[in-house]
Amino acid sequence: MKVGGFDWDAGNREKCTKHGLTWTQIESLFLGQPRVAPDVRHSSAEQRFIAVGRIDTARPVFVAFTLRHIDGQTLIRPISARYMHAEEARRYELAEDHPPTDHGR
């Protein structure tokens, strides 16, 4: 899926930056290769996703987001963003060191 940019407004800018990340850092996560998965616990009204990965500070971050279709473009709308907690970061690093394999299947 091709994404044409980000959907920011006063509501999500404030919420996403309250944990110390900047808009630029949040956007930079998606320029890399974050792990993305459905956020099934928070998806009752709209389809939501989580992305985890590293940013310029090398610290792992967590971003909850949804996709919006505006004027023919698909945009990422960040909902919440924060640095990962120590246990989350440890699990992320373990998974990064030992990616799943399909063992030839």
Image: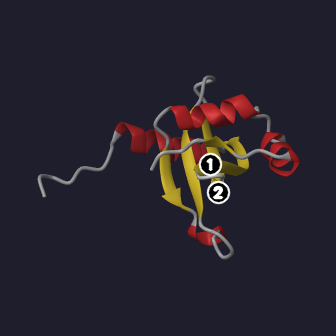
Tell me how many marks there are: 2
Q: Quadrant of residue 8?
A: top right
Within 10 angstroms of label 2, few (less than 14), some, or many (20 or more) residues? some
Residue kind at label 1, given as amino acid type = Leu
Q: Quadrant of residue 27?
A: top right
Q: Secondary structure at mark 1?
A: strand
Residue 10 image point, x, y percent? 88, 46
Q: For the residues marked 1 and 2, what is the alpha-carbon distance in whole angstroms?
A: 5 Å
Residue 55 image point, x, y percent? 59, 29
78 with respect to 94 (left or right): right
The quadrant the C terminus occupies is: bottom left
The vertical placement of 66 against 26, above or below, is: below
Q: Quadrant of residue 14?
A: top right
Task: Identify residue for label 2.
Answer: 68
19 with respect to 73 (left or right): right
The vertical placement of 11 against 39, above or below, is: above
Within 10 angstroms of label 1, few (less than 14), some, or many (20 or more) residues? some
Residue 32 image point, x, y percent? 49, 32
- Mark closer to the chain start, 1 or 2: 2
Q: Residue at x 59, y 49 (%)?
A: 73
Q: Residue placed farthest to the front in the image?
A: 71
Residue 62 image point, x, y percent? 63, 46
Task: Identify residue for label 1.
Answer: 75
